[in-house]
């Protein structure tokens, strides 16, 4: 039973890890958690649904269209809302992300309605693959592989490309990066776009498991934020590991302790981590001395 629980935990943890990565990526750049991340992914999932169900596009073309919509949505959010703010405080920025989240929620309800829909994903959640004593659905296996490939591509992008290095420099010190000729505003807009793309992929993996509706990403967003806090809001590898840890711990808690209180685990972990390790399990904790 334990290997099966671990495999299921890795699957849902992959989704939490992607959302945590998207949030940490923006937090490292702007120092603001983007609480509109979930609904940005939800709108992109609805866009993919429209491409598939209404326009009858092949899945590959629908996926490409969804990623383009996600990139555009992230860039527009940064350009129209974030960049135009005059000397915003962190609290103001958080309120802006919450306001944008409500705008997207209302837009989705107005455009697609509140009805629950089945997302036409080409891989079934019923067909299973036997890996020794573990039985994994094809969708869960694809979720794990997709998350690992996307994370590997993201880390390689930061390590081996000039744009990735420019993003890291902007995250570390925007003023110094600007002095050295890096166009930090464009980098910030691109970061919002990349974060939106990661969130859209997570939403597309969540939609076949549940149903597609405007509340699709509310619970995964909270769990992804909990994973980011668990791993460390300034550490991309920590965010990924935090997502997997949360998925496994949540599954084990539901199986051995209480299924009814399974959803509470994420928030209990936040409290415990903030008590003993305010910077997260995998991020460095700095103490300012005066």
Image (spheres, rainbow, N blue to C red):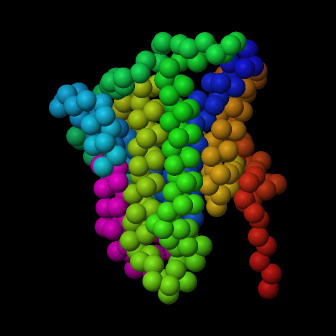
| Residue 132 position (above or below residue 156) | above
Q: Quadrant of the N terminus?
A: top right
Query: Can residue 254 be found in the magenta stretch?
Result: no
Within the image, what quadrant is residue 259 found in? top right
Q: Residue at x 58, y 43 (%)?
A: 17
Q: Residue at x 41, y 44 (%)?
A: 200
Relative placement, left or right, of 261 versus 34 is: right
| Residue 18 position (above or below residue 33) | above
Q: Residue 31: image x %, image y %? A: 56, 67
Q: Residue furthest left?
A: 55
Q: Residue 72: image x %, image y %? A: 30, 56
Q: Residue at x 49, y 63 (%)?
A: 161
Identify the magenta region. Answer: 69-93
Q: Residue 182: image x %, image y %? A: 45, 78
Relative placement, left or right, of 30 versus 213 is: right
Q: Residue at x 64, y 61 (%)?
A: 234
Q: Is residue 91 visible?
A: no
| Residue 31 position (above or below residue 23) | below
Relative placement, left or right, of 257 versus 167 is: right
């Amino acid at each position: 039973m334990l290997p099966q629980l671990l495999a299921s935990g890795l699957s849902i943890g992959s989704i939490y890890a992607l959302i945590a990565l998207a949030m940490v990526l923006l937090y490292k750049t702007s120092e603001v958690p983007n609480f509109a991340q979930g609904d940005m992914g939800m709108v992109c999932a609805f866009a993919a649904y429209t491409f598939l169900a209404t326009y009858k596009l092949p899945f590959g073309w629908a996926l490409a269209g969804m990623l383009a919509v996600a990139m555009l949505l992230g860039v527009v959010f940064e350009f129209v809302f974030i960049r135009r703010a005059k000397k915003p405080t962190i609290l103001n920025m958080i309120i802006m992300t919450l306001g944008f989240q409500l705008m997207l929620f209302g837009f989705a309800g107005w455009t697609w309605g509140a009805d629950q829909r089945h997302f036409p994903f080409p891989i079934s959640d019923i067909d299973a693959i036997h890996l020794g004593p573990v039985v994994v659905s094809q969708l869960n296996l694809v979720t794990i592989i997709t998350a690992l490939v996307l994370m590997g591509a993201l880390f390689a992008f930061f390590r081996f490309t000039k744009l990735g290095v420019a993003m890291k420099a902007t995250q570390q010190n925007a003023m110094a990066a600007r002095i050295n000729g890096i166009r930090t505003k464009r980098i910030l807009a691109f970061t919002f776009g990349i974060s939106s793309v990661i969130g859209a992929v997570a939403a597309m993996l969540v939609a076949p498991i549940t149903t597609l509706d405007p509340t699709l990403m509310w619970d995964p967003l909270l769990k992804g934020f909990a994973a980011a806090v668990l791993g460390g809001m300034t550490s991309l590898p920590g965010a990924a590991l935090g997502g997997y840890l949360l998925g496994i711990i949540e599954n084990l808690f539901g199986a051995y302790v209480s299924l009814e209180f399974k959803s509470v685990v994420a928030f209990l972990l936040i409290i415990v981590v903030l008590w003993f390790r305010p910077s997260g399990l995998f991020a460095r904790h700095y103490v300012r001395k005066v």
